[in-house]
Structure formats: C-alpha cells, structure tokens
Amino acid sequence: MPVHTRSQKSTKSESRVEGKGKQNMEENKRKGGEWGRAWEVDLFSYIGVCGLLMFAPVLVVYFFVSCDKYQCALSGPLLDVFSGKATPYDIWMKVPYMTSQAWKVGLVWISFQALLYNVPDVLHYIIPNYKGGIRLGSVTPAGNQMWYQVNGLQAWTISHIVWFANAFYFNWFSPTVIFDNWGGLLWVANITGNFVSVFAYIKAKFFPTNAEDCKRSGNIFYDFMMGVELNPRIGKWFDFKLFFNGRPGIVAWTLINLSFAWKQYELYGHVTNSMILVNILHCMYVVDYFWNESWYLHTIDICHDHFGWYLGWGDCVWLPYLYTLQGLYLVYNPIVLPPVHCAVVLTLGLLGYYIFRAVNHQKDWFRSHDGDCLIWGKKPEYIQCSYVSSDGTERQSKLLVSGWWGVSRHMNYTGDLMGSLSYCLCTGFGHLLPYFYIIYMTILLVHRCIRDEHRCRCKYGKDWNRYTARVPYRLLPGIF
Ligand code: NDP
C-alpha cells in the first residue's frame, strides 16, 4: 500500500489535539501561505502570476533568438528594433519553426524517460550506500505519506550509456541531435509543459490523488500557476513531481551539454577548456541530484510546492533551456580560458558544491538521528520546537543551531550560489546572457529563503523567533 495516513500510524507519544484539526485548517486559511502556496491571492501576487505566464515563455524565446541569430548578444534584437533595422515582426520571424524531426526527438525522449521511470531500481542492490528503490516521502500537511520509486540514477546512467554507445558505436542518430533541433524542440517543450499543466489543473478538479492536500484560492490564474494538487499521481507510482522535476529535464541536462560539446568539436575541430569545465561542473550537480534523489523527497519542491504551471512548464522548458545557457553560449563563442581562470572557477565550483552538499547532509544526518549524533565532532546544539499539523496532531521537531546551521540559516543556498556563479564564470566576461543563471538563482533562492522562513515562522511561532535570534543571518554571515 503506497499511501497511508500518518494519523493511522501516529505513535502514542504524539498527543491528539481533539477538535483542533478543523480549527487549525481554518487558521491556516486565515493566515495564508504556511504550506507552500497561498489560500488567498492579493493583487500583487495576481499581477506577478499573470506577468510570469505571459513573459516567461517570451523570455526563453528571446534568449534563444539572441543566441541563434546574434551570437548570444542579448541587446542584439532590441538594438535592431530600436535602430529601425528590424520590426518586432522581423524578430518574431527569426523564431525557429516547429519541425516533425523535433517532435520525433522530443517524443522519443519523453517516452524513453517514462519507460525508465517504470523500471524498478536495481542500482541500490549493487552500489553500497546508494539509497534508491522504494522510499517513503514526507508527511503532507493533511497527514498523508506516499511511497516513491527512486530510480533516477539508473535512468540517468542508462540514458548516458545509450548516448555514448550511439555516439561511438551504433550511429543511430547524430550526437549533435539536440543542438541541431534546439529551436524546434523549444516548441515541443512548450507544448508539452503547457499540456501537462492544464492536465494537472483538470485532474485536480475531477480526480485528485489526495483531495485533502489540494489547495484552491478561487483565482484561476493563481491556481493554474501555483498548482492545486500537492502530489498528483496517475496510478500507484507515476508521480508528476518526481518525474517532471527530475526527468526528462535533469537527465537531459548533461546530454544537452554533451550535444553542445560535440557541436563545438564539429564546428571548430576541438572542444574548448571552458566547455569541458561547464560539462564537468554541471555533471557533478546532476549526478549529486540523482545520488540524493531519496533525500530530495524531503525538500521544499516535493514537500510543499503544489504541482502547477510553475513546475510543469518550468521543468519542461525553463530548466532545460535556461540552465544550459553556458554550454549553448560556448557553441557560438568558443572561448579558451587561461589556466589560472580555469583553476579559480574549478576551485569555486568545487568549494560551492562541497558547502551545498555538506550543509544539506548535516541537516539530514541530524534529523534522521533525532539529534543523537555528532556535528563537527561535538554533540549538536538545537532548539526543541513544537507545532500542530493541519490534521490536528501536536508534533515535535528540532532546529539545529550548531555546525553549518549555526553559521547562517541557509548556507546550503550559499553553496548552491557559489556553484552557480562558477558555471557562469566558465564563459568569460564577454556577454551578460550566460550570467542569467546566477541572476535567476539569486532571485530564486532569496525568494525561497523568505518563503520558507514565512512558513517556518507560522509553523513554529516563538520557537522560530528563538532560532532567528540565535542564528541571525540568512545567507552570508555579517551581511544578509
Ligand atoms: P532546505 O533543505 O534548506 O530545507 C528547509 C527546511 O528545513 C525548512 O522548511 C525546515 O523544515 C527545515 N529547517 C530549517 N532550518 C533548520 C535547522 N536549523 N535545523 C533543521 N531543520 C531546519 O531547503 P530546500 O528544500 O529549498 O533546498 C534543498 C536544496 O536544494 C538546497 O541546497 C537548495 O540550494 C537546492 N535547490 C536547488 C534548486 C535549483 O534549481 N538548482 C531549486 C531549489 C532548491 P521543517 O518544516 O522540516 O522544520
């Protein structure tokens, strides 16, 4: 049975607060925004949501055209329009066509990933310490807990074996097939992302997986964007969030980079050190994601964010197109970095990755041992917190205040940002476009800090204030 309610399993030590469930739900509704997304929508959020729905797809297309037609100069299309050299219609005509070849590539890819998603994991039997296979997710606000088939590392490995086997042996398709169809695939990704989001919206209305975990504001745009269902599924195992979050976008990430590297080789007869560096740093991040996929079941994306356009379209379009901009840039601008530049970038990338992973691991270690462990060689210091979940059960939790979590409240984001900056620095200083990633990640993670802290303050109340008094900075000690 993949789903059981936490209330059925609650231990005797968890005291049931009679009658408080409904009252607490009402309280949540009143305060708004505790669990992932808001119950009520203010004008600011409404405008923001409509703006994103309209402009995010335009932005992705604009980036593509800037690269494809203006050698990645973001100012290129605008300068042409303002200087009278081209009309907005002329720029629109530079947008690539949807092609049947792109549809073939896109549909084969999605179907292949859907197939791999349904293959039970065998890697956890073979690789020591790898936590794949059937894993339990977090308790949802309504008290549900779901089982997940964690097999992302296996899907990533098989996909890459197929890619390399094809490139060096079978020659079924060109290794540059992704780059060569990048424009046409933009249509495929957009149509797929929108289709999935509309489907998720309709599904939430007519056949939700866990109706008690649905959230609606009554504002159609907001609900479509932020999602209604927390964990939509088809059947027992096909989990929308785990599938679309991780595959097809993240498995594709490293293949997209490889396709860009191969294209560089085809065009210039060599692969630049900058391209190799981008491939290595991105690959490290992607493999880390799949190695820790069972851990991701407990992150904000899976635990708190509902599945709407933000994730559905974001995973299909935003992630593959904008997270890979550095590699695309290097196809059009094959810069060779001085060895010192390479060394600095690599050091920053490795250090960022180390901090990101160490901080995440420390919290995981601390929580999974319920505080009974060592942090940096000492007994951990923590704040004992209590809260009432929306099923009315009073629960206990601990907030770590020593180790990395005593340095700042989100050092994992700081490490992530250091890594993100290192990817951008691989592209030198010629253009702004490949730096979009660090700008976006800074906005995303600062916004996430604020969102998460708002939720934690609502959840833990005074205990959270004790925590912020003890650890006053969010990202950079002494600065922010
Ligand atoms: P965290 O892993 O930081 O989780 C935040 C939660 O941890 C809080 O809601 C709270 O949950 C708990 N918590 C907060 N402080 C403490 C503490 N001191 N001790 C113990 N528990 C605490 O955030 P995310 O899930 O957002 O991020 C996970 C990782 O994913 C990060 O490293 C982030 O950088 C990365 N990421 C990457 C993205 C990308 O696109 N590349 C996008 C988003 C995230 P509780 O209710 O359990 O107390």
Image (cartoon, rainbow, N blue to C red):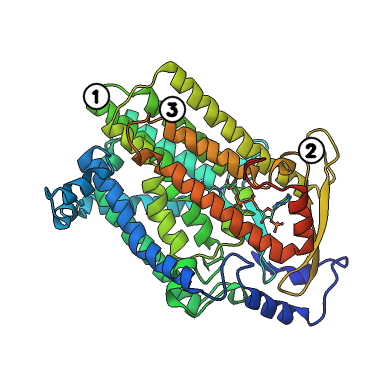
Is residue 260 visible in the rendered image? The answer is: yes
Q: Are there few (<14), some (14-19), or many (20+) residues within 10 Å of tag 2?
A: some
The label number, if any, that marks residue 268 in the structure image: 1
- Whole-angstrom CA distance, mark 3 to mark 2, is 33 Å
- Measuring from the top left, give residue 170's x and y in whole percent: 31, 33
Residue 279 position by quadrant: top left
The label number, if any, that marks residue 375 in the structure image: 2
Is residue 287 visible in the rendered image? The answer is: no
Image point 43% across, 27% down: which residue?
A: 277
Chain-order first, disc 1 or disc 3: 1
Depicted 329 relative to depicted 372: above or below? above
Going by the image, does 426 lie left or right of 101? right
Chain-order first, disc 3 or disc 2: 3
Q: Mark 3 = which residue?
A: 277
Query: Helix or strand or loop: what does disc 2 sit on?
Result: loop
- Measuring from the top left, give residue 455's x and y in whole percent: 65, 63
- Whole-angstrom CA distance, mark 1 to mark 3, is 17 Å
- Whole-angstrom CA distance, mark 2 to mark 1, is 50 Å
Task: Identify which amino acid the numbered label 1 is placed on.
Answer: Tyr
Q: Quadrant of the N terminus?
A: bottom right
Camera-nearest residue between 91 and 476: 476
Image point 63% across, 38% down: which residue?
A: 357
Q: Are there few (<14), some (14-19), or many (20+) residues within 10 Å of tag 3?
A: many
Chain-order first, disc 2 or disc 1: 1
Task: Identify which amino acid the numbered label 2 is placed on.
Answer: Ile
Task: Identify which amino acid the numbered label 3 is placed on.
Answer: Leu
Going by the image, does 327 lie left or right of 19? left
Image point 24% across, 37% down: which residue?
A: 71
Camera-nearest residue between 82 and 408: 82
Q: Quadrant of the C terminus?
A: top right
